[in-house]
């Protein structure tokens, strides 16, 4: 908000509407202004927003001569909305940094574990073989897409608000367009086609992008928590000494970063809903819906930012137990290969009979605690048309990984392309 | 879902994996398949989704020879997710048509009423003069931005899902990439870098875009309702005989399209929240969050589509009462010009004194039911530095409209550019 | 949280498990403990909650001998959940005080304005006559019901949490039930049938009751804003000097209390949704959903409390303009009496014909700017069966107020009964 | 809605306002009225609600003489709101039946498995021993509390709506209170202190109670899904042939009832938020918020009802594998007993040293794949103060179950008391 007032005066000085000395005095006043947020908040109650008290404080700090040029021609909503956009851009940049940081770790996990086979789980049940590399590639695509979406909003959609009390900018006089252009430049915000007071598409797009960051991060965190369960133990989040440790239960390895990310994501999604439902704003300034956005956007930025930071930390500390992944995969003794065996036998046996035969074999294998491979050896219809070597291959998860390798390459390429375009180091 | 199965077989025939005759038989079966949704729904309960019963019905309808090529290598989630994307694209296209229709009406209102002055209202109180053209231009920008955002999602983000049970596409065999490319083409969907089973950024982006459509439309509708209040009566929504009429209260003019749009928008925003919170999905297929999306997305599309259609209808039928706008504007007898008089007197009187003097004049004018112009005539400090002609101008709302004209032009240009790029007729 | 630790030690001393001197030392330590919330928050990151750092600080503050009795047998969730319940009860009590304060003002408005006729508005259109007393009675019933519901939750549903790490209370030893009973007594909380770690019905009920407070308050505030619109001007919220005043637009009377209440209510409803969606908690302690509750409940209490306080302030300052209400009522020159005239003529003319005749008369009256009464004088079918005196009565809004008086009495009686049962002064 | 119209006429006949023959004709007309909901919906678009078309259809069906007594004195909102309450009561009764059904199964599980030890899990990590009986008792308390809360709303808070267009009941004439009393009786709904048109506490309370049902049910379902994971395999949901079976992956046991319950609960919570946010309704009838409730409440009832029904089904079919629970519990070879050993050694060793010593022992045990009991044998400080028999007990999970038994008894007693008071058979 202080930046807005300082740069507004400077913009007006640029075109000669305000003496440069006054703009300088306002900048000096802004620099020494107290940041006592609670005081401003209390003082702003009667007017319904904190801009009046801030302007009065800035007038005082800027000295008598400059005072009348403070906040010249602006309205409270100009300050609040523009400040929200500036905060959104700054915080958004940090969040993107964390997302790229998390994505970079995922990229390394994906690339480095492309041959680490593990079980794919659907509805939390063993389904088919996959690789940990592919799982990490899936995380990577989600994080990259969420970051790219947020980047787009930050770059293309965050815009200056400057329209005066009713959006006509009449109080800014005939130079309003020139002031607007300069102020946009100075604050690094887009200049909108017109003041957007009660057109809330911009804040809503920001809120949605932040919620999507949270949702994506939450999926990654949830997977880490589930993979780290005592019975699964395929990954371990271990962000350093004391992290996730219980004083009375030393056997626990709590995935605290991931748990915190899940919690923050739940909050972010709900907070984003408040922003969305506040889009319906009356006439030239809303009677409540606008006011509901302020604290909500702040909390939403914190929550989504928390998700990104904690997921980055979790990804950076992840220990992967490839042996355990393999032993979990083999727990059902080959039953997870049933789909492949069925598909392979379908030409000879027909779909229905292949299903029945393999289904029966799987059930027998599980009941008798034998491997599917062994049971198939006793199935004459199977051995009649497949050699022992063929059956070995059919029952080997390592040979049934489909496009996982290409998918990893695609995900890495997409990430690298986004990262490069973002101009950031990994 | 049927389209998915038909085009999957056709894609597999394209590359020689499935006999063309089988693909044709499946297409023929698909054409005559019963659309008894309730039956499929009930039959799908045991498996947790309706794909199994649909596949069985299609197998039967396709004849014995083709049956085993139905749904070949696909998993339920491939069908459901791809179908959601196809439905999203089709329904999204209709919604964009309605948004452009509504925007076109707004454009005409903005252009045609750029000189119709009215009062701008903040917190539902008279604030400053504006024009109805500017108000309509604000609606136009909101609708255009929401449509452009949805267009972007439809074009760039809706993608095919084809990954088999665990996202490895192993069941599709070595030709999975070729099948995927062809199926994407046939269904008009993007081919993603990898299967996106539990990466829900895409459905979330669609949901967010639909919620933003609803939120924007709701703002327009709310303004219409407020402007049509019995005491305000500046616009009238009148979509034809019987519309908004009460049988026992013939004096009422209910803005039924706008009311319905507001109602649908409330639903859309809430439904979109369900989609957002469902992004956190376990491993390779979620245990509930995915299932929560299906009905929700359908309802969300209906609700947002309802908003767009009703706003279009409201905009198309809007009657604007320019005289009433002017008489409402003048209700406070010039008090709304106080900001301008203050700003104008500030150089001579200083900001603080100008505020006090004009504030006092306004209060007196309101108490004594006189015009601000009259009261200012009795203020010596004012008449000492402003001529009577100058005061006439200062108190005339028609001369205090700032950038409203340019804003309208900008809004029209932005809309026209989007519309042209969308390839649609207005 | 400090209260929990202090009273836990005291309860354990009550039954001889902990030396009384140790409990006293803990109480003394608690009294001088630093309340540096940010420090605790940061220190709690590694463990995922702030209880560990708090306990260590309390151990230190309690002295070497007492240290080992601090937090004895308790788990983090015992502290956090019980603290949430204690905070809920205390804050809830304040909120109920504000609700009763607001309700008391409504009761006076209802009773004092029972004969002040005004127009009832449906879909923001003039519908039928009503009284301001009845409108205030409607507010009163909403506030009373919301307060009674919250009271019920505070009294019957807020319960102690004490179960140790897995809800078995094994760490508390064989005296767990005795400790629980004493601790419940000391903290003024119910003793639940069993630890409720991941059974979140209690926090959900609290959240729902707070959301309902917010929703009800929001309805009242919205009515105040709408009634205070420049064109309506039937009520004025005026909470004292400087309240709702704009420095540059002195003609405005912003209903700042009501606007703030509407804003807070939007936040409260969204925050309550986060609490509701967090009910689904894993096993014996949730991996994120529980953590999402903490900050959310705090904010929800603040938001709902803000609604109650601002509605109380708005109600206490409300100025009612009965003349304006009457003149607004008469704006449609009797057209709002059409329902009654129709109903009255139905026996003679039949429902259909009565509707057509009166509908036509209303339309003519509005078009020709005459009163309905005048137009009816020219309708032979009407004058054939009704005398001039009868028509005067039929067209007089003051005689068509139905049960408004009895409704006010019922509302007052219900409020008084609740207030008396709450043991509070109005 | 039809019931409302029929019983309204009957109530008016009761007090002589309407001929009994007309009321009978209306009842006969109601019985043969078409239930073409889509047709009514379309016909109701112009008026914004379907009551008008329904009334016209009923007029026609009732015959010429009775037609004018159809819907006499009522307004659309009377019909819609009362119908919502009637539907809420009927559907709510079914939901309570399912909740009691589910609770009864939980009660049997709790009672029958009170000695089945299993591991308690916090943050999805092994924490301390508990029993499956206690876990089921926790489910039982949640379901009982949710059912009791819903019962309370159904019995005490569902109320008739009858107020005419503006809530004054003027159109009902002087007998309005008598009609209201009779209609309440006939429909089995409470008679409110006054019409509650825009006081939405009642629908909000119903929505909140339904969301709490969903949230509670979702917790139970989530536990079942987690306990049924391939690696955990402690329970199996098996609702009959074909249930949860995958045609291509016969080794899977999908917990389809639980998955469906989780999905429905996600929807219910979001839908309930729409209801809550719709509480803010304008004047005497809302311009959109009211209309947003209709479809939402219907869907919410379905979703919460779906949760209750599927949880009942899951609970009724649950297979519990006590051996597996024990072997999972013992997986960490006694490490989960560390808390108890620490607490036990604290008097001799002090809290800090006891933690260090036992923590070290646990880490060594896990690293060396030995049992905690074995490692403790080598700790001189331990063997110096505890006998071998004492250490056996300290390390035996079966002896560290705290109040689990009493908790189960309390939960059963609370359930039984609610069930008895509900007048339902289990």
Image (tube, coloured by chain):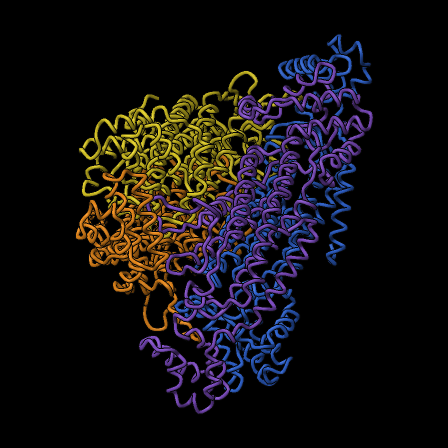
Chain colours: A yellow, B orange, C purple, D blue
Residue C417 place in picture, x, y as percent? 68, 57
The quarter of the rendered structure image containing the N terminus of chain C is top right
Q: Quadrant of residue B235?
A: bottom left
Above or below, comparing residue D372 to residue B385 in the picture: above
Q: Quadrant of residue D1?
A: bottom right
Q: In the shown orientation, is residue B128 left or right of residue C172?
A: left
Residue D173 place in picture, x, y as percent? 56, 77
Residue name at image x 33 percent, y 75 percent: C369
Residue name at image x 54 percent, y 79 percent: D29
Q: Nearer the viewer, residue A310 or B281?
A: A310
Can residue D264 be seen at all in this image of the molecule? no
Above or below, comparing residue B188 to residue D14 in the picture: above
Residue A80 place in picture, x, y as percent? 36, 38
Residue name at image x 23 percent, y 26 percent: A21
Above or below, comparing residue C115 to residue D268 in the picture: below
Q: Quadrant of residue A334?
A: top right
Q: How many discs mark residues in the rendered view?
A: 0
Q: In the shown orientation, is residue C174 left or right of residue D203?
A: right
Can residue A308 be seen at all in this image of the molecule? yes
Q: Nearer the viewer, residue B333 or A53?
A: B333
**Residue furthest top as drawn:** D380
Residue name at image x 66 percent, y 57 percent: C416
Q: Nearer the viewer, residue B108 or A23?
A: A23
Residue A396 place in picture, x, y as percent? 49, 29
Above or below, comparing residue A109 to residue D200 in the picture: above
Q: In the shown orientation, is residue A78 left or right of residue C8?
A: left
């Amino acid at each position: 908000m202080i930046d807005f007032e300082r740069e507004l005066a400077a913009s007006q000085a640029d075109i000669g509407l305000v003496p440069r000395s006054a703009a300088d005095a306002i900048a000096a006043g802004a620099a020494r202004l107290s940041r006592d947020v609670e005081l401003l908040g209390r003082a702003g109650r009667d007017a319904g927003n904190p801009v009046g008290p801030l302007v009065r404080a800035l007038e005082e700090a800027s000295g008598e001569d400059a005072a009348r040029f403070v906040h010249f021609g602006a309205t409270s909503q100009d300050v609040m909305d523009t400040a929200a956009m500036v905060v959104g851009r700054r915080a958004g940049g940090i969040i993107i940094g964390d997302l790229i940081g998390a994505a970079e770790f995922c990229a390394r996990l994906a690339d480095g574990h492309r041959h680490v086979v593990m079980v794919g789980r659907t509805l939390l049940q063993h389904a088919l073989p996959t690789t940990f590399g592919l799982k990490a590639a899936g995380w990577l695509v989600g994080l990259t897409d969420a970051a790219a979406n947020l980047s787009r909003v930050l770059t293309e959609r965050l815009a200056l608000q400057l329209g005066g009390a009713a959006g006509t900018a009449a109080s800014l006089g005939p130079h309003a367009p020139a002031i607007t252009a300069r102020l946009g430049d100075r604050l690094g915000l887009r200049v909108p086609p017109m003041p957007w007071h009660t057109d809330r598409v911009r804040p809503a797009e920001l809120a949605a992008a932040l919620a999507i960051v949270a949702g994506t991060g939450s999926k990654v965190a949830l997977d880490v928590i589930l993979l780290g369960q005592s019975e699964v133990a395929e990954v371990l989040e271990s962000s350093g000494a004391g992290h996730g440790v219980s004083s009375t239960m030393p056997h626990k390895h709590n995935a605290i970063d991931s748990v915190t990310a899940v919690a923050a994501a739940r909050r972010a999604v709900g907070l984003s809903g408040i922003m969305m439902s506040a889009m319906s704003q009356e006439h030239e300034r809303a009677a409540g819906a606008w006011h509901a956005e302020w604290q909500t956007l702040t909390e939403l930025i914190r929550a989504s930012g928390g998700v990104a930071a904690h997921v980055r930390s979790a990804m950076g500390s992840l220990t992967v137990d490839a042996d355990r992944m393999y032993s979990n995969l083999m727990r059902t003794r080959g039953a997870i290969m049933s789909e492949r065996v069925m598909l392979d036998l379908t030409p000879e046996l027909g779909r229905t009979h292949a299903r029945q035969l393999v289904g029966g074999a799987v059930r027998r294998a599980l009941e008798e605690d034998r491997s599917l491979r062994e049971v198939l050896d006793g199935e004459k219809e199977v051995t009649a048309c497949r050699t022992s070597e063929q059956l070995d291959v059919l029952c080997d998860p390592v040979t049934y990984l489909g496009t996982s390798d290409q998918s990893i390459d695609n995900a890495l390429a997409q990430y690298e392309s986004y990262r490069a375009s973002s101009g950031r180091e990994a």
